[in-house]
Amino acid sequence: MSAPEISWHISSFSASGGGNCVEAGPLNDGTGRVAVRHSKQQGDPIVYTKAEWQAFLAGVRAGEFDFFD
């Protein structure tokens, strides 16, 4: 997978992270898949299906990851 296929996004909350950021972006292939990578290690990203990504976001919104507080 080449980088031009992905429109990378970084959270505005990561601005002071010193480059330690998670980047995510949709693949521009019409599948709805989303790629995730570390901003300092931009090798092969982890790619999630649309359903996997939606399940993750639903978990975030439902507070399933609040144990990190």
Image: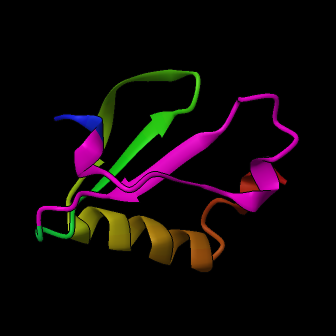
Position of 15 with respect to 42 (left or right) is right
Residue 50 sits above or below residue 61 on the image:
above
Residue 37 sits above or below residue 5 on the image:
above
**Residue 62: % across, % down:** 59, 79
Residue 45 sits above or below residue 65 on the image:
above
List the single residue furthest toward the front.
4
Position of 21 with respect to 55 (left or right) is right
**Residue 60: % across, % down:** 58, 69
Q: Which residues are magenta?
A: 4-29
For the point 11% across and 68% down, which residue is it? Answer: 31
Residue 16 sits above or below residue 38 on the image:
below
**Residue 27: % across, % down:** 24, 57
Whether residue 58 appears in magenta in the rendering, the answer is no
Whether residue 6 appears in magenta in the rendering, the answer is yes
For the point 72% across and 29% down, which residue is it? Answer: 19
For the point 75% across and 60% down, which residue is it? Answer: 12
Q: Choose between 67 and 13: the one closer to the eye.
A: 13
Q: Choose between 66 and 21: the one closer to the eye.
A: 21
Examine the image and state in which quarter residue 18 appears: top right
Position of 29 with respect to 33 (left or right) is left
